[in-house]
Amino acid sequence: SIDVSDPVAAALKAWRAERAAADQVPAYVVMWDQHLVGIAARRPTTKRELAGCPGIGPARLETYGDAILEVIRGAVGS
């Protein structure tokens, strides 16, 4: 499960919920919890770093990459 005390993990979970609702799909279709946790732990700052995270293949990188990096930037306050 997602540790919502981690601001990055909490922000990613909120983003996933919004994206899933917008796309009219279940949240797990956007990304699994374990992948959000892994991204939050690594805190990638570039698409190359994000591509190295489990669960991020070419399609997800293309579809969600910029949004995920923006969410991380916002959550860490940079």
Image: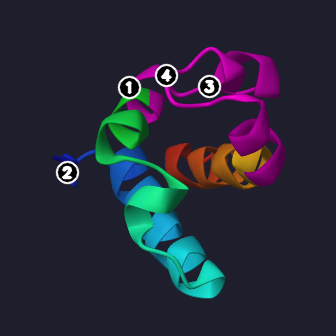
Q: Identify the image quadrant of the C terminus.
A: top right
Callout 4 environment at 10 Å: few (<14), some (14 to 19), or many (20+)? few
- Residue placed most toward the observer, 31 or 74: 31
Give the labeled residue for mark 3: 44
On the image, the x and y values in percent for residue 74 come to: 61, 55
Helix, strand or loop status at disc 3 = loop
* Residue plotted at (41% across, 35% down): 35
Mark-to-mark CA distance, 3 and 4: 12 Å
User: Which segment is the magenta one?
Assistant: 39-63
Residue 51 part of the magenta segment: yes
Mark in front: 1 vs 2: 1
Name the kind of residue labelled 3 in the image.
Pro
On the image, the x and y values in percent for residue 29 come to: 48, 59
**Vertical side of 74 occupied by 72: above or below:** above
Give the labeled residue for mark 4: 54
Label disc, if present, on residue 41 of the rendered structure: 1
Name the kind of residue labelled 2 in the image.
Ser
On the image, the x and y values in percent for residue 48 come to: 78, 18
* Residue plotted at (52% across, 66% down): 15
Helix, strand or loop status at disc 1 = helix
- Residue placed most toward the observer, 6 or 25: 25
**Vertical side of 31 occupied by 23: above or below:** below
